[in-house]
Image (cartoon, rainbow, N blue to C red):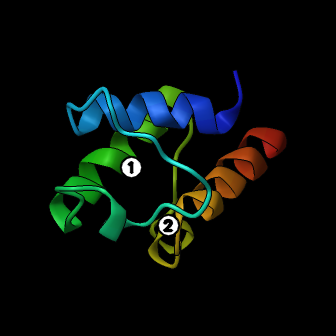
Amino acid sequence: MSTIEQLQSVFRDVFEDDDIAISRTTTARDVAGWDSVMNVTLMISVERAFSLRFKSGNIAGLKNVGELVDLIDRLKASA
């Protein structure tokens, strides 16, 4: 399963919506309920799903799901 497929599963769990379909260009504006509070929940869930730990500086500047996928892949490769 690719990183984005795994990530989509996390999004569906966090937002409790089995119809969410994310792509590399998806942003918070594209997902109903994705606000700053939900972003914290999402990032914690992503850390758990991928067995990673983010530094706040790593995630603060992310512009879209594609950048999150790239970050996850970089962290997995360096682990």
- Indicate which disc, 2 or 1, sits on the residue closer to the N terminus: 1
Label number found at residue 65: none
Q: Residue furthest right?
A: 77
In this rendering, does residue 51 appear at all?
Answer: no
Q: Nearer the viewer, residue 70 or 19?
A: 19
Residue 64: give x, y in percent of width and height: 53, 67
Residue 23: give x, y in percent of width and height: 57, 51
Residue located 56% across and 39% down the image:
52
Please name the amino acid that badge 1 sits on.
Met
- Is mark 2 in CB contact (under 8 Å) with mark 1? yes
Give me the C-alpha separation between circle 2 and circle 1: 8 Å
Residue located 20% across and 65% down the image:
35
Residue located 48% across and 28% down the image:
49
- Residue 69 sits above or below residue 8 on the image: below
Assign a secondary structure to mark 2: helix
Residue 66: give x, y in percent of width and height: 63, 59
Residue located 23% across and 39% down the image:
15
Label number found at residue 43: 1
Please name the amino acid that badge 2 sits on.
Ile
In this rendering, does residue 60 appear at all?
Answer: yes
Assign a secondary structure to mark 1: helix
- Residue 38 sits above or below residue 4 on the image: below
Please name the residue that numbered disc 2 is placed on.
Answer: 59
**Is residue 49 found left or right of 74 in the rendered image?**
left
User: Which quadrant would the N terminus be assigned to in this image?
Assistant: top right
